[in-house]
Amino acid sequence: MNISLLLQMAAEACPDRRALTHLGHDYTYSELYDAARHAAKIFADSGCRYVSLLDTSSPAVPIALMGAAMAGLPYVPINYRLSEAQVRDLIARVEPVYLIISDEFGHRYHLKGHLEERHEFLGKVLRQHPIEFEAAADPSAVAVQLFTSGTTGAPKAALLRNEHLVSYILGSVDFMGAEHTEATLVSVPPYHIAGISAVMSAIYSCRRLVQLPDFKPSTWLELCLEEHVTNAFVVPTMLTRIIDEMEASQFDPADLHRLVSVAYGGGKMPVPVIRKALQLLPHVNFTNAYGLTETSSTITLLDPDDHRSAHDTADDAVRARLASVGRPLPTVEVEIRDEDGRVLGPGERGEIYVRGPQVSGEYEGRSVLDSEGWFPTRDAGYLDDAGYLFLSGRADDVIVRGGENISPGEIEDLLHHHPAILDAAAVGMPSDVLPLAVALAVVLRQGQEITGGELEDHIRIHLRSSRVPESIRFVEELPYNETGKLLRRVVREWFAD
C-alpha cells in the first residue's frame, strides 16, 4: 500500500470536508488530492529522483508528500534551521532533486539549480482540472527520507518505506474517525517525523489540519480559539511556554473548552509541567507519545486514563508513571538489554530495543536491525512491573563514575520538583580523580535563589553522594532544539575545561 492511498480514501469518502487550514485559508480533501495528482505528474516528468522541501509548514507539505509517493519518489524535507553549508551538503546528497522552497530560504541559502518557489508550485497544482495519475504500487519503496540531526559527524539518512508508515497509521488511527467539526493544530516543523505523521494521521482520520508555521505561545492560543481547535500536538518546551503565557496574560483556561486532546512528545516532559497542565485544563485528554524517526513515529503511549490515574492517586508506583512514556502500541514489542545483549527485567536500566512492522531501522546503504528484526534505539531506560517505559536519556548520555552508571534523568527529575528550579541538565565532565564526574547546569525560577552548596545537599539527601555534582553552573536557559530535545553536547561543552 502506498501512503498516497490515505489521501485518496479521504477524498473519496469526504471530498468536500475541510482538510487543511493555512493562514486562514481552507482546502478540501478533493482539492488536496487533485493537487497531489498534478504534483505527481510534474515530479515524474521532471526526471528527478527525489522531491525535497525547504520551507515552513504550508499546503505544499501534504501535497508534496503525497505527490512524491504517487510518483514513487522519496520525499526529503530539509531542516531550514541549518547553516548554508549544511543545507547545501544535504541537497547535494539527493541530486537530482525537485526542490520546493520559499523565497526567504532561497535568498538565505543562495541556492541555484532545479528550484520551485512555493507559491509557483502551488499555483501549478491547486485548482486545476482533475487528472488521472496511477500511483506507484510498491509498498517497499522509500516514501520518506529524513536526515538525522548529525550531532556527531555527517547526518544519517533514515529511510521510511511505504509499508512502515502505512503500518503505523493503520495500527494507530481509525479511518474517518473524526467528526467534521474536529481540527488538529500542529506546530512542529515539517522536517520532523512528528510533523509527517501528523499530516498522515489527520488525513486518514479526516480531521482538519491547522498549520502554525512559526510557533509562538500567544499565537497558538489565538489559533485554538479562532479555528475551534479540538486536538493539538506539541513538544514539551512548547507546552511549558503555553502554560507560562496563559498565566502571564491571565488567559482563562475555560476559553479552551473546545480543546479535547493534547498529545506531546519529542523530548522529556518535566513532571511539574504536565501536572500543572492537568490542573489548568482538567477537561483535556493528555497523551505522551514516544517514538523515533526510525520507528515511523510513535511506539509507546501514556494515554489520558494513565495521566489522570497517575495524577490523582496516592499509590507511589502509579503516581510515578506520569514520568513515563507509557506502554507499547499493540503492534510494537519493547525490550531492555544490557551491554552484552542480555534482556533485562523490570526496573533494570539498559538500552531500549523495539520491533514491529512500522520499525524501519534502516539508513541509506545499511540496516541496523538485528537478525530477529530488533532495532537498537540508543535510548536508555527501563520497564516497570506493569510494562510502562521510563526513559533515562540517550545511552551515550549515561555518566559512568567509578564503575557506576548514573542516569542524568534521575538527577534532573529530582531538581524539576524543587520550587526554586525551573530547569536542569546533568552531564558528565572530565575529572582529575575519575574518568567522569557529574556536572549540573541549572535555571532558577524568576525571583528564586539557591546556592550550589544547598543544591549539593539536596541531591545528597534524596539520592546518593555519587550523584552530587563536582561543578554547578547557573544559566539563564538551557539549549533545546526546535523539537524540544535538550542539546546535551552543548551543555557538556560548558564543562569541557
Image (cartoon, helix red, strand yellow):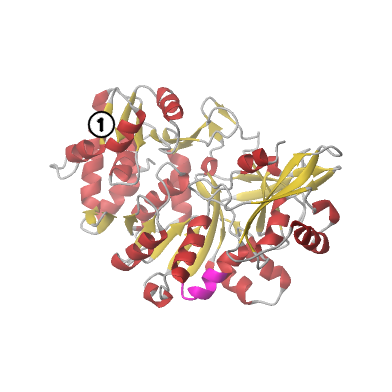
Give, as a single range, the part of the protein colored magenta.
276-284
- Image position of 31 (left or right of 295): left
Image coords of residue 243 (percent x, y)? 48, 66
Pick the front one: 262 or 454: 454
Residue drawn 36% across the image and 55% down it: 202
Image coords of residue 395 (percent x, y)? 69, 42
| Placement of 86 over or under 473, stated as above or below | above
Mark 1, secondary structure of its residue:
strand
* Residue under numbered circle 1: 116
> Total label count?
1
Image coords of residue 368 (percent x, y)? 61, 32
Residue drawn 35% across the image and 60% down it: 219
- Image position of 245 (left or right of 132): right
Pick the front one: 132 or 223: 223
Image coords of residue 43 (percent x, y)? 27, 30
Is residue 187 at all visible to an observer of this figure? yes
Residue drawn 60% across the image and 66% down it: 447
The amino acid type of the residue labelled 1 equals: Glu
Label 1 crowd bin: few (<14), some (14–19), many (20+), radius 10 Å? some
Magenta stretch contains residue 257: no
Pick the front one: 142 or 120: 120
- Image position of 71 (left or right of 495): left
Quadrant position of the N terminus in the picture: top left
Residue furthest to the left: 129
- Quadrant of the rendered image containing residue 68: top left
Is residue 133 at all visible to an observer of this figure? no
Quadrant position of the C terminus in the picture: top right
| Placement of 137 over or under 33, stated as above or below | above
